[in-house]
Amino acid sequence: MIVMEFESGTTWSMVLGVVLLCAGPVVAWALRRAAASLRRFGIPFLLLFLSLSCYSFSNVYPSSWGPNLVSQAGNLMIVAVLWLAVEAIRWLLTLAILERFLNFTVETITKNIITAALYIAAILVLLPWVFGIQVTTVLTTSAILTVIIGLALQDLLGNLFAGVALNIEMPFRKGDWVQIGEHIGAVKEISWRSTKISTLIHDLIVIPNSVVSKSVVQNFSLPTRRDILVLMMGVAYDAPPNKVRNVLKEACYHAKDVLNNPEPVIRVKEYGDSSINYELRVWIHEYSCYKDARDQVYSLIWYLFRRHNITIPYPVRDIHIKTASHKEDVERKALFEAQKARQLREVELFSSLDDEDIALLASESPSMRFGEGEMVVKQGDPGDSFFLIRSGKIRIVVDGASNKRIALAELNEGSYLGATSLLTGEPRNATAIAATDTELLVISKETFNKVLVSKPEIASELGRLLAERQLDREAKLAASENMAPKMPTAERERQLHERFFRKIKQFFQI
């Protein structure tokens, strides 16, 4: 048996070499799987551990490691240390100081410039130290080559220096909405050669930096991300400007992507050939909302204009048309009134009215259109009108005791809402939202008063119907919040009937 005895120092060098040789790949693998900012440290750490391992093994087997191998291991260690130093300084400058401490967004091209400068400095250190090459000799002998390369790559270098200038001046940053020449989009990347923007239709446009530096750049995201949307609207000459302004403002207030503060600015711009032209200036969250906000405002304007009898005029033309006869107009109007009367006759609330009363309501009750998502009435708002759904759907919601919005019902064609406000003048007890495009027949207090004054005896029946609807509403609310009824149904119905009957007589003074 041959026994090999090692000195304690040699043994520890052997163990250290094995540990370093095994730890290098493990550390490199762990760094490659770590955060993106740490992945670049993997390879230089591997080289450092490998060079240290070589030094340890050279102490164990000095006869097998000549001076040349030891020198190469030392050079490898210098390269690894410089590499780690470059990456550490790069991380410290870009992430720790600029981004985290100074809260400064560092673009990709800026990071690349810092990295290139650091590596060039490291190479200039390595050349004389490791390879024995003087820097002045390299720069002198490569002058002609530099001129040739510069001439061949002048376009690329032009884009490079333009990119550097853009990062120094920073007319825009990543994520900003800009217009460069005729192209509009969000900035996705500023690289060495080009700037990439994504348009509203999600196309990617690559613009050379030299072109960007020579173009007029409009940044929609500065000084704030909020932007102004300018719209034009032509309105008939017979519509009073103050009324038009109020209606246009209402449309802006209800548009989801339009900000209410600052308030919309609406001005008369000019008297056109066939219309008074108005200019609307509204604030939106950011430029990407431009098309959606424009669609919402214009759609709401159509519905609001119809409800307020404001006309959007057609262009003036000299045309010859065949007009309908007076008889046809009368027949069409009579058919329309008959349709409204038929729908009113089916309403339980008006079951005690005769045909003459129904005809009166039909003739004096206008139709209004609401777009999908529009609020018809809001809980707590005052009101004294009644709505009959001629077409479409209405969603009824209320704010419960815990400020939770509760969906009570979805009303279809032939259903009605607002009976309590019409008959008692009480504030709206629920919020009604158009679930689809909806047409409503609107009966005002003044119109219904003409019927009730001539038939005061129906007030008791109307009070009973209101009591039944209120009981049904309270039952749904109690069920949604898991609450028990406060008193027996019969007693509660009697109290409600008396209260509503009394309020109807007071409201209509009968």
Image: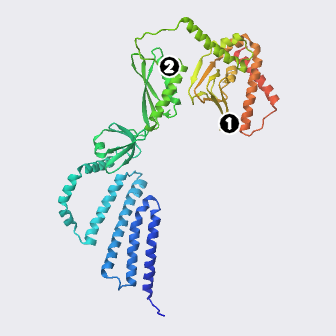
Which quarter of the picture shows residue 112? bottom left
The residue that label 2 is drawn on is 243
Q: Is residue 379 visible?
A: no
- The quadrant of the picture occupied by the C terminus is top right
Answer with mark 1 or mark 2, whichever residue precedes in sequence: 2
Q: Residue at x 39, y 60 (%)?
A: 91
**Residue at point 29%, 43% (across, down):** 211
For label 1, the SS is loop
Tell me if I can see residue 196 in this picture: yes
| Residue occupying the point 47% across, 92% down | 3
Residue 168 lies, in percent from the top left, at 32, 49
The residue that label 1 is drawn on is 400
Classify 175 as above or below 364.
below
Mark 1: amino acid: Gly
Q: In this view, does 345 lie to the left or right of 137?
A: right
The foreground one among 298 and 379 is 298
**Along the line of sight, the residue nearer the viewer: 197 or 322:** 322
Q: In which quarter of the image is residue 83?
A: bottom left
Q: Do the residues labelled 1 and 2 touch (CB within 8 Å)?
A: no
- Type of amino acid under label 2: Lys
**How far across and down, in percent of the image, does residue 158 sit?**
26, 49
